Image (cartoon, rainbow, N blue to C red):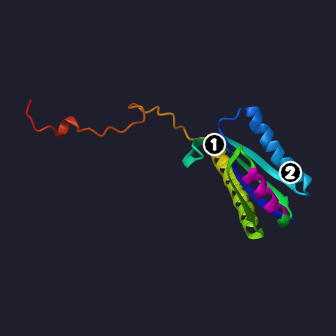
Amino acid sequence: MRTYEALYIINPELDDSAIQTITTDVEQLITNNGGSIVRSDVWGRRKLAYTIQKHTEGVYVVLRFTADPAFVHKLEQYFKLSETVIRSMVLYLDAKTLKLEEQQQRQYEEDLRQSAARRSHSDDDDDDDNGDDEDGGYRHRGRDSRDDDDDD
């Protein structure tokens, strides 16, 4: 079994229930042929970069799944024959790509933890930074009256 990612664009003139039916049909096609769904995301209605079949918008769906390599051709044929799918692409995700993605996700989560720790640490700071100085904690940048050249 290999991991794949499919991006397909559905005709924007369909209502939400028809779009849900199409995504469910694609997922069932994969699972009925021995595959499994890893993640399914409906990105929603978006503007297309160029007109496709007289449409300027489409409903984007991204689907990550595992399946046998022989099945991918069947899925691509399904997309080509479907009148509701206006564009599709299926990509193979090799082990190196998946490993890199996993490392990036771990790094992102670690960065979030460190950021949250820094924020909580700075909130616990005992410094009194509330600006109780006589000038409200601000430094004046204007000219001082001593620097005036006119002799009033």
Horizontal and vertical percent position of residue 35? 88, 57
The image's mark for residue 47 is none
Tell me what residue is drawn at x 68 percent, y 55 percent. 108
Q: Amino acid at mark 2?
A: Leu
Please name the residue that numbered disc 1 is placed on: 58
Residue 122 in sight here: yes
Label 1: few (<14), some or many (≥20) within 10 Å?
many
Horizontal and vertical percent position of residue 120? 66, 43
47 lies left or right of 62 = left
Tell me what residue is drawn at x 11 percent, y 39 percent. 149
Residue 125 in sight here: no
Please name the residue that numbered disc 2 is placed on: 29
What is the span of residues highlighted in magenta in the rendered image? 71-81
Horizontal and vertical percent position of residue 56? 56, 42
Horizontal and vertical percent position of residue 54? 57, 43
Magenta region, main secondary structure: helix
Task: Please tell me whether residue 76 is drawn above or below residue 136 in the rendered image.
Answer: below
